[in-house]
Amino acid sequence: MGSKRGIAVAIVAALLIVIALVFAIGYYAGRSRSAGQGNTTENTEPETEISTVDELLDTVTAAEPVSRPAQWYGAYESSGDIERDIDLAGFENRCSDVYAFIEIPGTGIEEPVAYCEDAVDPFWFSHDIDGNPSDKGMIITDSLNGKDFSDPVTLIYGKNPDDGTMFTGLAAFHDPDFFKTHDRVNIYLSEAELTYRIYACYIGSSDHIMKDYDFNDPAAFNKYYDSIADIRDLAMNIREDAKPQPGDHAIVLITHCGDESKRLFVHAVLDEVRWGK
């Protein structure tokens, strides 16, 4: 038993000696090659030997930093590539005031959004994308908001014609079951996709909320959304964990209803940004 163990030890020792000799020969051969290259007339740099893990890591080229959009949404981490390719340029060729596209899954709402400089008599609310007079008009925002959804609250208007286009589909959010299973609004800009989570749907006064609240003031922002949370209406649907907070970017979708003194409101808050290509 002892002799077998001694033989095994001897074999291991011999192997270690052989390995050491191989490394030594390789090392001196490398030094000789470097010296030989140094005697040539060419201006060549000596080979760099990496001897530590830190040196190895230092030789790895760092990945290029992601180029963020210069717009406000570039401050948000992107959730990935834009999921749908919208030909905004095609819409803009027909109407230079188109700057976005809105999609609300489950409602059939998929429309370009036009900007109207005149908030009192918005042109595109009574004309189609080609500038023809139209009872349906277009989905619009106006000059009380910016043209990029960067405001704390952006109002988006659309009519509800009998053919089911424009914002007619918003009425689906009156159904509690539909409201529970559909909570997204997607807005596409030229370089980003903004996904909003729906907070509430209800019928309220047609009074213009921008005239009553300065949403840049956190106190006014909270006051407005607290007033929505306090509404006592059995026909109202609300998702309490999606309540907008100061610093958020929210949208309000607004359309007509049977009573001209009332409007149908659907509120949503920015939940996800995609700006990858």
Image (tube, rainbow, N blue to C red):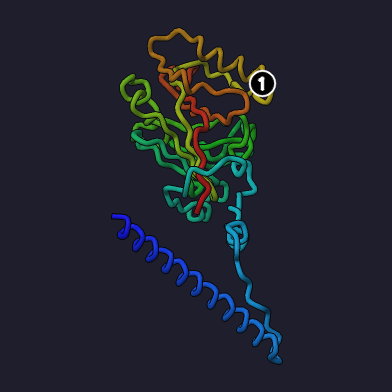
Q: What residue lies at 50% left-to-right and 13% top-to-bottom?
A: 229
Farthest residue, direction left? 1
Front in this rendered view, residue 254 or 222: 222
Q: Residues within 10 Å of mark 1 (few under 14, many from 20)?
A: some
Front in this rendered view, residue 258 or 103: 103
Q: What residue lies at 37% left-to-right and 24% top-to-bottom?
A: 173
Q: Which residue is mark 1?
A: 218
Farthest residue, direction front? 2
Is any atom of residue 10 visible in this view?
yes
Farthest residue, direction top? 232
Task: From this view, report whether residue 137 is shown above or below residue 248.
Answer: below
Front in this rendered view, residue 218 or 108: 218
The secondary structure type at the circle numbered 1 is helix
Query: Would residue 37 appear left or right of 227 to someone viewing this image?
Result: right
Q: What amino acid is at disc 1?
A: Pro
Front in this rendered view, residue 6 or 238: 6
Task: From this view, report whether residue 170 is shown above or below residue 235.
Answer: below
Query: x, y percentage for residue 4?
Result: 30, 59
Asked which quadrant contains residue 214, the reply is: top right
Query: Would residue 198 appear left or right of 251 to someone viewing this image?
Result: left
Query: Would residue 91 appear left or right of 218 to someone viewing this image?
Result: left
Q: Quadrant of the N terminus?
A: bottom left
Query: x, y percentage for residue 274?
Result: 50, 44
Q: What residue lies at 68% left-to-right and 79% top-to-bottom?
A: 45
Is any atom of residue 126 visible in this view?
no
Q: What residue lies at 39% left-to-right and 60% top-to-bottom?
A: 9
